[in-house]
Amino acid sequence: MNAFAAILGKDLRAELRTLQSLPAMTLFAVTTFVIFRFGLDRTSLSGSLASGVLWTTLLFAAVLGINRLFVAEREEGGFDAIRLAPIDRTALFAAKAAALVVYLLVLEAIAVVAFAFFFLDSAAALPPLLAVMLLADLGLAFAGTLISSMAVNSRARDLLVPLVLLPLVVPLMIAATGASEPLLAAGGPGYERFGTWLAVLALYDLIFGLLGYAVFDFLLED
Amino acid sequence: MYGKGLRPLSIATVAMLTLSLSLVFFYAPLDADQGFIQKIFYIHVPLAITALIGFVVGGVFAILHLRSGDSRWDAYSYVSIHMSVIFGVAVLITGGIWAKASWGHWWVWDEPTLVSFLIVFLLYATYYPFRYAIEDRDRQARYASVFAIAAGAFVPLNFMAVRMAESLVHPRTFGTANGGLPGEMMLTFLCCLTAIALLWVTLVKFELTAKSASGQVKRLRRALDAPAPGASSRIAPEVS
């Protein structure tokens, strides 16, 4: 637990001081919304179109952050330090996933508000959307941390994360867009199958959380 | 060492395939709705089932590899996934033909089984660039195993999510309320499934034998100080 807090604190502090990932992610998301505005030639969005635009943008912005998640560890020898330290290696997985969840929440705090200003008529959908985002972020963080920790040790680092992660998060995106679509419907938020989709998201989180816990040790061996 | 039993296995596979195909064309009744084109079902569905099980089997071999550290299991896992990807291409092609003939389109989106299979196929297609990107052999084997395990767990999850998102066009052949297949069709189908599964096992064994033979040749050449002709694969694991 101490190791977890220490690594998470280190990551957040490093991000605050260098601002490597977050500004890029948010800028990317907001610019993508502008591109969608012209690409779709719409000034307001609702229903499936809105949830599709929102989640596609968030996912691609998240990939930017996931790409950079372990770069400092690799370049500054953090992996060796973790290997030497008398701590459970899973602490690194948990701390990195937690850091990623924090990044994603900050990203969403800015990007979703921008999305609402740009495209939505009312903000009524935002509070229930938060529940969807929390669960989706967790799944994205688990799968992303797992892939990122492998990709960072390869030759094609920036290529491998989007390549492998995108098919892997398809079920997550199905559930997230499925839950968001009625929330963002034109006539005010609806809740068809809301609970079911949240359950799918939670199941995805559970499976990839357990998977990361089970296999992360093998990724650090050398 | 991998070649042991290969000949009887190959003969059994060919015999089973012959038997199944003759059952398909001469024994199984014509489908009342779809007529002759429905026969592709006996190839398409067993191929799909075998490919999916092959992916999961690759994941199980990967677990064995991580637990034991024996690189032989990595080779098993690699070959299983490799063969299932090839079967997957065949599934997508036969599926497209069937869809064109019975629904009028090569591809139908509101059809969960097709879409799930495509997603699983796309994920496993990234297995090759993934392996290729990692240079160190040991690390490549370990990471590939982690990939295979994660993807193996992903297969059922993905099928569930896609099925929930979609409607019901695809024929639910088994376990539907009105009874599934008639007896002759079921028998033919089971024969085909066995034949295709045998084919998969045989091909996996052939691939492992070939890999092991070329590995031995390479070692002998090294012992004789003769340079190996051509570059060997950087993705495929070496088999001893």
Image: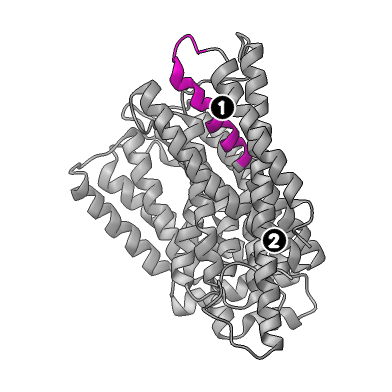
User: In the displayed image of the protein, which residue is found farthest to the bottom?
Assistant: B225
Position of residue B116 relative to residue A190, above or below, is: below
Amino acid on which disc 1 is placed = Tyr
Residue B43 sits inside the magenta stretch? yes
Name which quarter of the figure residue B48 lies in: top right
Horizontal relation, residue A78 to residue B95: left or right? right
Closer-to-camera residue (A126/B73): B73
Provide the residue designation for mark 1: B42
Amino acid on which disc 2 is placed = Thr
For disc 1, the neighbor class at 10 Å (few under 14, some 14 to 19, many from 20) is many
Which element carries disc 1, helix, strand or loop? helix
The reply to whether residue A29 is in sight is yes
The reply to whether residue B110 is in sight is no
> Do discs 2 and 1 share a chain?
yes
Horizontal relation, residue A80 to residue A107: left or right? right
Provide the residue designation for mark 2: B209
For disc 2, the neighbor class at 10 Å (few under 14, some 14 to 19, many from 20) is some
Nearest to N terminus: mark 2 or mark 1: 1
Q: Residue at x 51, y 35 (%)?
A: B162
Residue A46 is tagged as none
Q: Which residues are magenta?
A: B30-50
